[in-house]
Amino acid sequence: MMSFTDRVLGAARLDVATYEEVEADGNATGQAVAVIALSSIGGGLGSGLDVGLLALVIGIVGSLIGWAVWAGMTYFIGAKLMPEPQTQADFGQLFRTLGFSSAPGILRVFAVVPVVGWAIDAIVSLWLLAAMVVAVRQALDYKSTWRAVGVCFLGWLVFVAVVAALGTGAVLGFMAAT
């Protein structure tokens, strides 16, 4: 069994064996949450905003909740609506692999570097997408990478729609209260 560090590095390298190990290890859920939190911290620090500790903690908690919603949508779409014949996965398996697919996001801390920060952020975003596709393909036992791409895209669309609806509701609620 790999160490936590080996798993993070393996996930970042898009190593299929790492994703298979994490998928099968029911005890790796806490590690997956840690990777998501580290990625959120990297993104928060890399934004360059002086937001303070409380805002950073709220951002991390919000990221974890939002991420769990996105993972749930991806599970529903991938395992229930668009499974391949060999797809057999539970939410925990997908949650763990998707959690580790957040590993490249830790590098977003370097997006604060002047002049090249935007390029670092763009490269890490594409890397994150590739890692998510590998995670979905492995957790859902897909033979088709394109199906995994489609599931990631549809899960993201549903997530964005939910966030937009909640955001619009929050704005309208705030406006009605003032």
Image (cartoon, grey):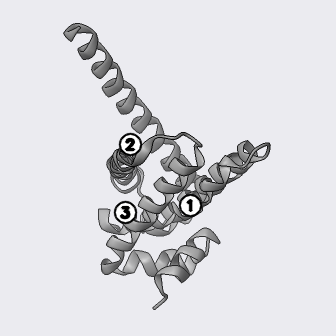
Horizontal side of residue 125 vs 173, given as left or right: right
Residue at x 78% of width, y 46% of height? 116
Residue at x 50% of width, y 74% of height? 19
Q: Which amino acid, mark 3? A: Phe
Residue at x 59% of width, y 55% of height? 128
Which residue matches tag 3? 95
Task: Indicate the secondary structure of the residue bearing disc 2.
Answer: helix
Q: Is any part of residue 91 visible from this angle?
A: yes
Horizontal side of residue 101 vs 120, given as left or right: left
- Residue 119's x, y, as percent? 75, 46
- Residue 154's x, y, as percent? 47, 41
Pair 2/1: label in front: 2
Q: Residue furthest bottom?
A: 1
- Mark before the other along the chain sequence, 2 or 1: 2
Q: How many marks?
A: 3
Residue at x 37% of width, y 32% of height? 163
- Residue 140's x, y, as percent? 43, 64
- Residue 112's x, y, as percent? 66, 47
Task: Indicate the secondary structure of the residue bearing disc 3.
Answer: helix
Q: Is residue 159 above or below residue 35?
A: above
Residue 55 disc label: 2
Give the distance between the C-alpha atoms of the residues marked 2 and 3, in whole angstroms: 25 Å
Residue 106 disc label: 1
Residue 92 disc label: none
Q: Is any part of residue 84 visible from this angle?
A: no
Between residue 137 and residue 50, name the one nearer to us.
Answer: 50
Give the distance between the C-alpha atoms of the residues marked 2 and 1, in whole angstroms: 18 Å
- Mark before the other along the chain sequence, 2 or 3: 2
Between residue 92 and residue 89, name the one nearer to us.
Answer: 92
Q: Is residue 51 above or below residue 149?
A: above
